[in-house]
Amino acid sequence: MITHLRQAYNGSFKQSSHDSLINWLTEQAGVRPKFQVSETPVFIPTYLKERLLEAGKDIIEVVTSQRFFDLSPSAIPKGQAVPQRTDHPLFLQMDFGLCLDEAGKITPQLVEAQGFPSLYFFQDMLAAGYRKFFDIPDHFTSRFGGLSVEDYHRLLADCILDGEDPKEVALLEVEPDQQTTRIDFELANKQLGIPVLCISELERSGNKLYYKRDGQRIRIKRIFNRVIFDELLKRDDFDLQFNLTEEVDVSWAGHPDWFAMLSKHTLPLFDSQYVPKSYYLSDILGIDAHPTSQSSGFRERIGDFEDDSDLRKYVLKPLYSFAGQGINLSPTVADIKAVPDPENYILQTKVSYEPLVETLDEPASAEVRMMYLWPPDAAEPILINNLVRLSKGKMIGVRYNKGKTWVGGSIGYFE
């Protein structure tokens, strides 16, 4: 998006350098990335950086408000509340699609906010890798707030460990060896010294949790949670001694409730030029399921859904899906009427991604994830890193980019 840098990068690109990057990442983590790592980072100009920061402030203003804390618990599905919820999420991420405004300037549009950790360790390693094998200008950075690499990892360690012995802090997942993001788990293990455990490995004795390593039974005092409740509920083949909803003597680095509380469920609460209007489907249908009034005007405009054209500008999204699953890009009246649980869906104004990143064939569109930490003693979240996903398909995601190059996971270097 900065013409001279893009031309210089593309002109000097060598596939062998990208192959070396992947091999180096594999060496650092001990496992190969299971997702596609793009051939290019993205260079973010100052004015776009300022817009992304402003958009972040708009989101933070909502999630730090009393209204948000009053309303957000209603997002937790019945029977899925986890004891000892923290006062606020430890991790906060905002995904912005890069679009064009009416003046033709690049502008971010919020796709989703989430209170769940994602690739905080891998992204910093990826930034180092691009610098190692490609020519990245020194005055561009992927981190924020003047954080050095040492500062960055010290902050992550402080928040995740919270003073506990690393061997008593478990990164918890469902079959972590099979997860697409496994490389991030392995880097967390190497950098923090914490074990990576499947929830099926946990043993419970009273209100205490344990795991076994090398013949030793080790107490778990803190959980770095990577379990997504929806995925866990689908697994009826596990013999579990511990269910997330049970009261146990542990603290949480990323409490599970925040996955639901800060998610697509939050979108209708935002009022910002950087947030496409979103509406709970139940509100539109006149079902009193969510405490918001933002859908009333929309309900009057759309009437009784007699014409599919009323829905042309919207996408239908399930509240609790992950990685783009279940999204309907072109909903019809029939689709709306067929939804069995409208309280678990939203209609969101479509975000039109612009193919802004020139590649060696067709240009790619981009989505930028701004990655925050919210330490327990901080008044608000702290922006520390970013993630970029490049796509040449209808949506961001592997299944929309099969067989394509210069797509997948990347990072932004900010001017």
Image (spheres, rainbow, N blue to C red):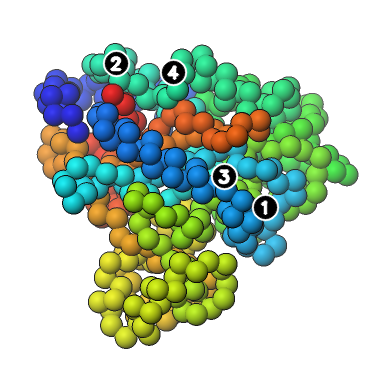
Q: Horizontally, is 205 left or right of 267 in the view?
A: right
Mark 2 burial class by Cα count in 10 Å: few <14, some 14-19, many 20+: few
Kindly report the distance in space between the C-alpha atoms of the residues bearing marks 1 and 3. Answer: 37 Å
Placement of 244 over or under 358, stated as above or below: below
Q: Amino acid at mark 1?
A: Phe
The answer to whether the residues at label 1 and label 3 have Cβ atoms under 8 Å apart is no
Q: Nearer the viewer, mark 4 or mark 1?
A: 4
In this rendering, position of residue 88 left or right of residue 210 = left
Q: Identify the residue position indicated by label 1 in the image.
A: 238
Label 2 vs label 3, nearer the camera: 3
Element type where label 1 sits in the image:
loop
Please give the name of the residue rendered at 69% of the width and 56% of the height, measured from the top-left corner. Answer: 81
Q: Secondary structure at mark 4?
A: loop
Residue under numbered circle 4? 146
Residue named by callout 2: 139
Query: Could you say which is closer to the camera, residue 156 or residue 402?
Result: 156
List x then y, in percent, for residue 148. Answer: 46, 15
Residue contact at pointers 2 and 3, CB within 8 angstroms: no
